[in-house]
Amino acid sequence: MASSAGISKGTVPYPGPIPVRRRPGAVGRRSEKRILNSSAPALERGLSELQQVEVNLEASNGTLWAYMRPDGRPCQNPGMLADFKRLQDGIERSFAANCLDIKYFVFGSRFPGVFSLGGDLQLFASKIRAGDEAALINYGNSCVDVLHRNMNALNLPIITVGLVQGDALGGGFEGLLSFDVIIAEKGTKFGFPEILFGLFPGMGAYSFLARRLGTIKAQELILGGRTYSAEEMHELGIVHILAERGQGEAAVRSYIAGNHRRRNGQQAIYQAAREVDRISLEELRKIVTVWAAAAMNLTDRDLSIMERLVTAQDRLIAKAPPAKPCEVRIHG
């Protein structure tokens, strides 16, 4: 892999113009300026404030990689949701400014053994105890706004790839369903534990699963409360490509390399599929209100279970290695 041409860490201001190096022997090939303009002002504005998402742009194959680096528990806290929106806004602005031309967007996690554990349960419990239903709706709407944009690939000619190198539970699994392609390492786990404390995944899971698997199977996955292996999800057609343990990124690269000639047709069929099985933002937001109303009816026992899960998530933080600062890397 080519060396990094520009790095921004933590809250340090993003560097100025970002040089993009040509690979040796690239003379005569399509100019890499079509992938990334050297000044990339729109991209800078979109990525300079990211706190919990690491971004790597590989100009050589037109791939933008993004990895969650959660601040605390590996869940979708409000700060991470804000980062998701900033990232999406930055990509859209960069395309509009004609300074970014990527073909693939790959999304994964840097937290060891975990893709995402889903919603911010500590936030949920506190808002429910405070009787703040509006805050739950605002949180849910933030989630489905990001999910709906991703489901539509930001209305750009790109293929979205969810890379699963650790467990994806609750909202983490839910978010994955918005990607065109899911590539998961063997042994990773998927599931919706919400029913264990009297709730359901209210940010898109039912909408996606009912269209893909039918309502009966969707309800079985959601109401069963059990976890499934990546292998089982592959058999159901939810996971598209299985990778060996530790080989998730290699599997993504293999997929991209092998997809070169048919990428245009594949991206178009994903777009057509969205027209056939359209999921509106209005539908997703209505389900959020159903979810929030159900949350307000949870008992003290339900909330205690939720809070015990938060404690278990906190133990994961203690076992994880120290978090590294988020970075923005541009590779030639």
Image (cartoon, helix red, strand yellow):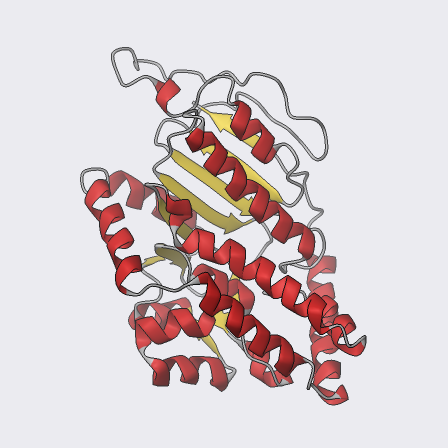
Q: In the image, is residue 65 above or below residue 68?
A: above
Question: Which part of the image, by quadrant, shows the C terminus?
Answer: top left
Q: Residue at x 46, y 57 (%)?
A: 148
Asked whether 142 or 267 is in front, the reply is 142
The location of residue 246, given as percent across then percent down, is 45, 51
Q: Nearer the viewer, residue 110 or 210?
A: 210
Along the horizontal axis of the image, is 310 left or right of 268?
Answer: right
Instruction: Tell me if 210 is positioned left or right of 169 in this view.
Output: left
Residue at far right of view: 130
Nearer to me, 98 or 108: 98
Comparing 212 with 240, the one in front is 212
Q: Is 155 left, or right, of 270 in this rendering?
A: right
**Residue 146's spot in the image, x, y percent?**
52, 54
Residue, x 72% and y 55% (percent of image)?
72
Q: Position of residue 210 (x, y in %)?
A: 36, 76
Please say whether residue 202 is visible from this viewpoint. no
Q: Position of residue 188 (x, y in %)?
A: 47, 64
Seen at 31% across and 58% down, the residue is: 274
- Count of marks placed on residues: 0
The quadrant holding residue 259 is: top left
Identify the image quadrant of the N terminus: top left
For image coordinates 54% across by 46% down, the residue present is 67
Residue 104 visible? The answer is yes
Say which quarter of the image contains residue 235: bottom left
Query: Can you name the residue that lies furthest to the front here?
Result: 282
